[in-house]
Image: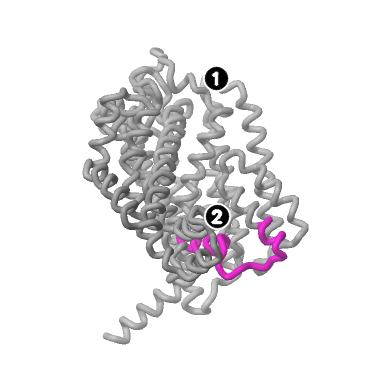
Amino acid sequence: MMSKYYLKRETQRKLKAFQEYRLSNFAWSASLVIAILFLFNGYDLFERTVHIPFLACAGIYLIFGLLQLLVSVKIKKDVLEAGAIQTSTRIFGFSLIIALLTGNIFVAIAALDMIKKGKTIEYTLSIYMALTNFCIIMISALNIFKPYVADLFVLGMGILLVISIIHVLTMILISSFVKNGTVDRRLLPLAYLLIFTSFTGNVFSLLLGFTLLSKIKNGNKEVPVTWIDILRRLFRNSMAALGLLFITVLLSVSICSYFTFEYTLAIENNYSTLLLPPSLEYPFGTDDFGRCVFSRIVFGGRISLLVGIISTLIPVLAGGGLGALSGYYGKYVDNFIMRALDILYAVPGMLLAIAIVAAFGANTTNLIIALSIGYIPTYARTMRATVLSVSNFEFIEAARACGAKDHIIIFKHIIPNSLAPIIVKATLTIGVAVISTSSLSYLGLGVEPHIPEWGNILKIGSEYLESKSYLAVYPGLAIIMMVLSFNFFGDGLRDALDPKLK
């Protein structure tokens, strides 16, 4: 009995050491789940009609899911028998890259990760960078089927295609000129080019550009603990990497939608297209005013990200500053600040937000202020606890002994060494802020009703749950995906910043 248990644990340990196996398992399981979702949407129980496009998508995802399952079985066999993934198995990954054309990014990521044996952080970043740009192009290209497109649609798509070609070439160059973490100096112009192309919101392009630039400038010499090491640990967590991918795609689409999406389709009434079912022209159907739900969700993501980020940034600065002063000076300053914040902390955040919005009116600015005030005490407490610990370190005592002034010690030494828990908390708070924004908008106390925001879209869709359920399902899924992405990314970032898990 003990022998069987030991062999099982040993097998799990061997397989866990291969990221390719973990990604492959996640890819085939995610593909099968999406295939089931498409299958359910392929048949309308109330109208008893069959939607061929949804059934076709279900079949495509099912096929690639089963192919990826076979790859997982082959990887497991290779690892247990030979202790490594065979070259023939890696070559099979080239055939699965075609899944990208169907929008199956899970299988595409697993395939691109599998085809290269010795993967560097630069290669991993290039994969996610290229996939992000591909997703933007695929999402934006759906506007071709609409009655009319944005005036800058052709220009925007042309720029995206050029950037996409640059990113694919970058993958090839990195595969050739980055060996064992050493970056060839000839990639310096490429690093600047990648930083420039990140204006589309592609976070991976920005990270890759700075990674290449940092290594080239430092002669490929790295100190023991750097942000590059944090990136390596972060991308070992597949869920955290996928969470960051979804956040980046949403950010990029929000920025590129200024050029590739027509805003009038999301806000202007069109009584000739009332409550149309999902189609190529309207991928998520139309609402009771004839507005394109797909376009509304795209523009709604812009509002959710804006409110979530700003309503988190304000308490980070305000609460972090108060917590730093409280923890550093202590005594009367600490007692005064913390007791004042305890009064604010005693009021539930959501109740406080509702009271502020009800008193000053429902609009985006008041919503941001209302959410921000409620988060200040938690950030102040977190920063205070960290500052109390950091203040006892020897380098702080050395700074005092050298005659450094208090504000220099606080801003130059203490706060930079206290940011890790604040950064992790901020990533998790953004997800909470998105839920709060959608909840208040659903109640009519958030963003103005005429603005396409996920809570507003969900409120309209909830009135048609029995007949047109997809009007509520799609914005609900968007909220769930964003919150889960920030939570997964926050959990992965917490593990990456934890010195005990290096």
Label 2 CA crowd tier, 10 Å (few <14, some 14–19, many 20+): some
In-front residue for pair 3/249: 249
Q: Please, what secondary structure does the residue beneath circle 2 have?
A: helix
At 43% from the left and 61% from the top, the residue drawn is 25
Q: In this view, does 462 lie to the left or right of 52?
A: left
At 66% from the left and 28% from the top, the residue drawn is 155
Label 1 CA crowd tier, 10 Å (few <14, some 14–19, many 20+): few
At 30% from the left and 24% from the top, the residue drawn is 360
Q: Give above or below for 303 relative to 213.
A: above
Q: Give above or below for 85 relative to 147.
A: below
Q: What residue type is labelled 2?
A: Leu
Quadrant for residue 85, please give it: bottom right
In primary-sequence order, the first of circles 2 and 1 is 2
Q: Which amino acid does label 1 sit on?
A: Tyr
- Highlighted range, magenta: 212-237
Q: Give above or below for 224 relative to 261.
A: below
User: x, y percentage for residue 210?
Assistant: 64, 53
Residue 485 in sight in this render: no
**Pointer 2 and pointer 1: residues touching (CB < 8 Å)?**
no
Residue with the mark numbered 2: 96
In-front residue for pair 419/85: 419
